[in-house]
Amino acid sequence: MKDSVFKFDIEEFKIGKLTKKDIDFPSFYGLQKVKAPIFVYRASEEVSPCLVITACLHGDEINGLSGIQDLLHSELKITKGTLIILPVVNIYGFLNKLRYLPDRKDLNRCFPGSSKGSFGSRFAQFIFKTITKYGDVFIDLHSGGPGRFNIPQIRCDLHNQNILEMIKNISIPLVVNSSLRDGSLREAINDINKPCIVFEGGEGLRIDTTINKYIVNLIESTMKYLGMIESDFEYNLDKIIIKKTKWLRAKEGGLLYNSAQRGEVVKKGEEIGEIKSISGDLITKINMENDGVLLGMAKTSMIMAGDALYNVGYIDDDFPEEEDEMLDYFDLEM
Ligand SMILES: [Zn+2]
């Protein structure tokens, strides 16, 4: 992958306004190039503080893109620093309505990437070098996969002091402690000692405009914290901190009848769903194993034994200490 394919020079963007450019992404088989947009809002000669927003690292997680559209169509007035937005990072997956890159790699397991690695690794490096050249703070927008809804939340490492300080000042109702995933953008940025938070909200292949409000508030409050915008707006800074999460899995296969509300706080033993047979007979009830908040849930009704149904966040400190599960891609969307 030639460096010349993706040219991004901040000096090409005028100061004082939002500018969109279509960037050439690597082509295949010598055919026409694929283009994806990049938005840059430079408020001052000094690039810093620079906030970078990425979305659609997983090509089918499009709710972040919709949140960005709302932000860009608001009366955005940045007075200091730079906002860089890549709304469709994995344009290849996006065009095919798929999470993955054309080489079947998960881009968010390929960072920071290498110029001598697989296509995924080269592409990851190409993105990583570009955004980290200027960025001081990073927000990476994700959603659940298709058929799986996540309530709006951020995921970050609560042991990182820089991130803890930032979280106090940004608007998001739910903060989930999450260890770093090998090869994720968040891990690679953490390794260069810069803060990166992952936003999760919504469902793959769908746009839920109620999620957009959380995305806009998160980005705007972060810019206010960084001194990039002047705003008298009082963002709601209250938040629930979740230290541990666990997937509640189907003990039996069948048809899922959910009776819980997403985002609901439910008590241990409370029934949140039923699994029924084709003839409608009850196979098993699903009950909460601990008190917790429902962070995410399956939207698919056809269930196999072992399928992840409800992502439960423990509110109290008395969560069970268990080995981390082996998670498939559907279980952990970031
Ligand atoms: Zn994702």
Image: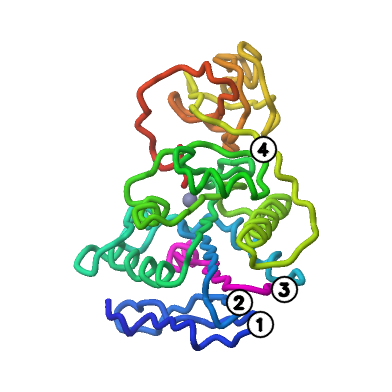
Horizontal and vertical percent for residue 312?
56, 27
**Residue position marked by numbered label 2 in the rendering:** 41
Q: Nearer the viewer, residue 138 or 149?
A: 138
Q: Is residue 310 left or right of residue 73?
A: left
Span shown in magenta: 78-96
Horizontal and vertical percent for residue 162?
49, 48
Residue type at mark 4?
Lys
Question: Which numbered disc flags the more N-terminal residue, 3 or 1?
Answer: 1
Classify the position of the N terminus by image quarter.
bottom left
**Alpha-carbon span between mark 3 and mark 1:** 8 Å
For image coordinates 39% across by 52% down, the residue present is 190
State the mark number for residue 239.
Answer: 4
Question: Which numbered disc flags the more N-terminal residue, 1 or 4?
Answer: 1
For image coordinates 43% across by 69% down, the residue present is 131
Question: Which numbered disc flags the more N-terminal residue, 3 or 2?
Answer: 2
Residue type at mark 2?
Tyr
**Residue position marked by numbered label 3 in the rendering:** 77
Q: Quadrant of residue 317?
A: top right
